[in-house]
Amino acid sequence: MQEPTFQKEMACRERGIRTVIVGIDEAGRGPLAGPVVAVAAAYRDQAGFVVPEDIRKQFRFIRDSKTLSEKKRDEMYGFVREHFLVGTGIVHSGTIDRMNILEATFLAMKEAVADLKRVISAERETGAATEDMLLLVDGNMKIPNLTLAQEAIIDGDALVRSIAAASIVAKVTRDRMMLEYDEAYPVYGFVRHKGYGTKEHMDALRKHGACPIHRMSFKPVFYSVPENVNRNLLSRKKR
């Protein structure tokens, strides 16, 4: 299994880049329900990106969140937040329906960057969120309408450690939210599938209709909901 490294971040330093280097990733683009969550993660040792000897073994588990078990992700969530400064952006289903999922994902990423700036300012007691940054964004698209320097990296969560760190925090944050939604809407089984379109989820949609966290603009939801159920939710996509 490929292990992400700080090689990309260190190469940026060698090119003379002196701004804060940040990994960006998201969780929740594909599900039929719940929010999309983006995270911006900056390693605390921005000068050298050096991993202390005593925690190198644990750092090997900072990798694409999809390659980790749920138990290991939960364990690494705290470890990442200890060694990285983290900003989070969350965009809910209503906004996803109004904007579309791609634009909602970019909005969540922008919110994550803004949150990280606040975190860094608080950490450094500067009192202003003015940090300049280089964003390393997972995927093949940069975040539009953002003045910060960016680089899109395909399979970034498998290659770049800062992106991998962001992927873990984003996934765990979203999964924990879906566990809370499961308590509010237990008939859908969110605790098991986290909003993805499993058979269990689709069967529940056909039986019970949609709930307020479903993405009505997603065709599997729209066409599975009985015509006489949740008309107020069906109309949300048109607003």
Image (cartoon, helix red, strand yellow):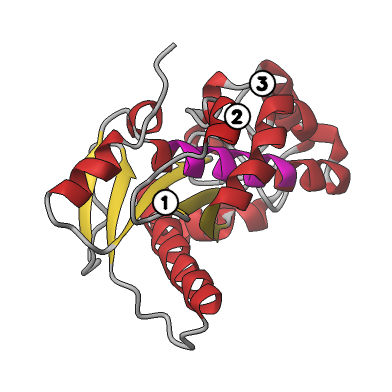
What's under tag 3, amino acid-wise? Ser
What's under tag 2, amino acid-wise? Gln
CA–CA distance in space, label 2 to label 3: 15 Å
Q: In the picture, residue 226 is in which quadrant? A: top right
Q: Are marks 3 and 1 in contact (CB under 8 Å)?
A: no
CA–CA distance in space, label 2 to label 1: 30 Å
Dominant secondary structure (helix, strand or loop) of the stretch shown in magenta: helix
What's under tag 1, amino acid-wise? Thr
* 73 up-or-down from 232: above or below: above
The one nearer the camera, 228 or 12, is: 12
Residue found at x 52% / y 83%: 125
Q: Which residue has dot 1 on it?
A: 105
* 84 up-or-down from 223: above or below: below
Q: Within 10 angstroms of label 1, few (less than 14), some, or many (20 or more) residues?
A: many
Can residue 92 be found in the magenta stretch? no
Q: Are marks 2 and 1 in contact (CB under 8 Å)?
A: no
Instruction: Give the side of residue 91 with respect to residue 23, left or right.
Output: right
The one nearer the camera, 88 or 199, is: 88
Q: Which residue has dot 3 on it?
A: 69
Give the SS element for disc 1: helix
Q: Which residue has dot 2 on it?
A: 58
Question: Where the N terminus falls, by quadrant?
Answer: top left
Going from the N terminus, do you reach mark 2 or mark 3 first? 2
* 156 up-or-down from 203: above or below: below
Q: Magenta residues, as a range?
A: 164-176
Residue found at x 71% / y 35%: 74
Residue found at x 36% / y 53%: 22
- Residue 3 percent coordinates (x, y): 42, 21
Q: Does the image show residue 141?
A: no
Q: Does the image show residue 163?
A: yes
